[in-house]
Each structure stands twice: as C-alpha cells, then as structure tokens.
Image (spheres, helix red, strand yellow):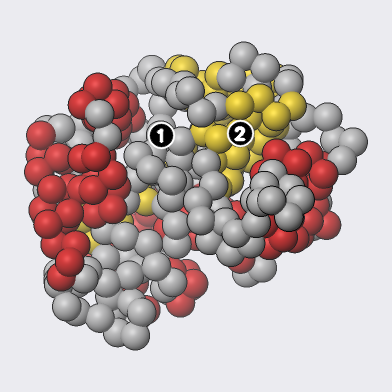
Amino acid sequence: MVIAALSGPLDAAHVRGLEQAEATLKHMGFRVRRAPLLEAGRRHWWSSAPAAEIAGELNGLLRDPEVRAVIAHDGGQTVLGYLDLIDTEAIKADPKPILGYSDISLLHLVLYSRTGLVGFHADLATPGLGEAWQAAPAARRQVLEDLYTTLLTGGSEAIGMLPAGPSWECWRAGRAEGPLIGGVLNRIMRTQATRFALPLEWFDGAVLFWEEMGGEASWVWSDLQVLRHCGILDRIAGMVVGVPRAIGGLGSPDASPSLPEIVLDVLGDRDIPVLGNVEFGHAGPNLPMPVGIRAGLDAGQRTLALLEPAVRPRVMS
C-alpha cells in the first residue's frame, strides 16, 4: 500500500495525521510506504507538485508490480491537470485499487470510463484514517477496519450489506439494483465536461451516489439540474446521498430548503428510491463506495448492499 500526494500538499500541521494513517494501515496488516512527493512543505501553488510531476509518480506506482493499492493522502484541486497523462495501459495490465474522495473522485470516474477500474470513493489517508477514524468510537473504527480489509484483500465473495448508521434517511422509498456510480457532485459534473466523460448509457439502471462540501444550497440545486439536463437523472434507477458538510443555506431560518427538498424538487416526477445522509465523503469516517460494482438499494428499509467483489481475488501486501 502506497500513500501518495495525488492532489494537495502535505502541510506540517498534518504530519501527525499521516503518521497515524500509516500506523492504522499497518495495524490492518498492510505493508505501507510513502511516495516521494508526499513530503511536508513540498508544494506548487495549491498542489503537491506540478500536475505532470504528480502524473509521473502515479504512473510509476501503476507500473510497479509490488504496489497493490494506492491511497491518496488528501484531496485538493489538481487531478484535472493530469487526466490525460495517466498510463491507462498500465492500469489495464495490472488493475489496482485507488482510494480517496474529494478531488480523487475525478480519478475514479475517468479511470472507470477509460479502463473499467473500480476505484474506491473511500477515506483519504491523512484526514480520514489518520484523523477522522481516530476521533470515532473504538467500535466504529473496528467496523471500518474490518470492512476496508475485506474489500482490499479481494476474495470471491461480495461484502453484502454495508453497516447502516442512525443518520440514514429514506427520502423516497423503493428498491434498485445496478452499478454504483458517483462521487463529489461537482466532480461528477466536471468529469462529464471532459472528453473522458462516462457514456450516458453507462448510467442506465445505475445507483448514483454523491456528496458535497462547501458552497451554497442553491449551487447543489443547480448542479443537480445540470445532471438532469445532460440526461443522467433520467437514466439512473436509484440515488444515495452522503451527509452534507458546510453547505450554506440548507434549511436555514430564511425558508431555504433542506437537502431532501432540493433533491426531490430536481427529480420531480421521477419515482426512484433515494437514501439520504449516508456516511461517505467529507462529513466523517467513510463507508467505501466502489465505483462500478453492482449495488442493491432499498431506501424504504434503509439498506445498501455491495453485490460484487471490489478487487481481483489477489492478496495485497
């Protein structure tokens, strides 16, 4: 397992979190090392390095047979700069999981589109495993460790039901089964604006998952309208929405709408199941959402199941 700076830099204030992430992964049984660009104080503008340099390091990891998975140290604002520089042939020759959320959503969606790689919209190393996990109750940490270990070490059996939390809400009842596709809402939009966009037919019968951080409630409404206008919302069979974080105006005293109201307003007459406030994304310790594998959703019963193995059945080290 390699921890890499695939987007943002490592600030000195978060070195301790990175060290804790390494310790957590080792406790889970993985051999861990840092990629060279993951160095405190190294930065180029808002990134860990120029985009081409990040791509070069990532390609080296993709070509290295000893590397069985890559987890992003943090998110950021850089992945758009090197989508066209990734060695997709190396991925096809030796698929390996990439973990992370935020800006890493772009990698998951584009690499799924270009190579069929199942990427994990899952916790980042430093703010996730190294910080959010450490603040969670011990029982929750153990659930996450067991879940991530099972997913990453392959095997021929699907995980099945993800552990439901008390925050999960049924926003529209119903059942759906299909490929799990999604990420950060604004990154889904940006992906679809590139030449590496997922073909629209790939959303036929899909379970769309998304989460968002920052901005305003009106932005979320507008971004969902973009997905409607480009045809995605007409094709999906169900939707799973993550816990929102730092979105201005949601359910505020000035009569702004709640997130369920926004979602149902955009969907209109589309009668598909919607499960809300699921723990993935920026709001805290993440349930992993593997892009591209089949999932079963029952919003009325507040359940979500992973119906296929997420990685090839090869033990990772």
Q: Position of residue 290 (x, y in %)?
A: 46, 38
What residue is rendered at 52% in x and 33% in y? 278
- Return the residue at label 1: 287
Q: Is residue 193 above or below residue 72?
A: below
Which disc is residue 276 wearing? Answer: 2
Query: Which callout, 2 or 1, points at the residue further toward the start of the chain?
Result: 2
What residue is rendered at 44% in x and 72% in y? 77
**Label 1 sits on what residue type?**
Leu
**Can I make out residue 231 in this image?**
yes
The image quarter containing residue 189 is bottom right
Q: Is residue 3 above or below residue 60?
A: above
Q: Residues within 10 Å of mark 2 (few under 14, many from 20)?
A: many
Q: Position of residue 293 (x, y in %)?
A: 51, 33
**Can I make out residue 192 in this image?**
no
In this orientation, which residue lies closer to the viewer: 138 or 47? 138
Is residue 267 toward the left or the right of residue 284 in the image?
right
Q: Secondary structure at mark 2?
A: strand
What residue is rendered at 37% in x and 62% in y? 75
Which disc is residue 229 wearing? Answer: none
Query: Hey, which residue is sitting farthest top in the picture?
Result: 301
Q: Position of residue 20 (x, y in %)?
A: 13, 48
**Label 2 sits on what residue type?**
Gly
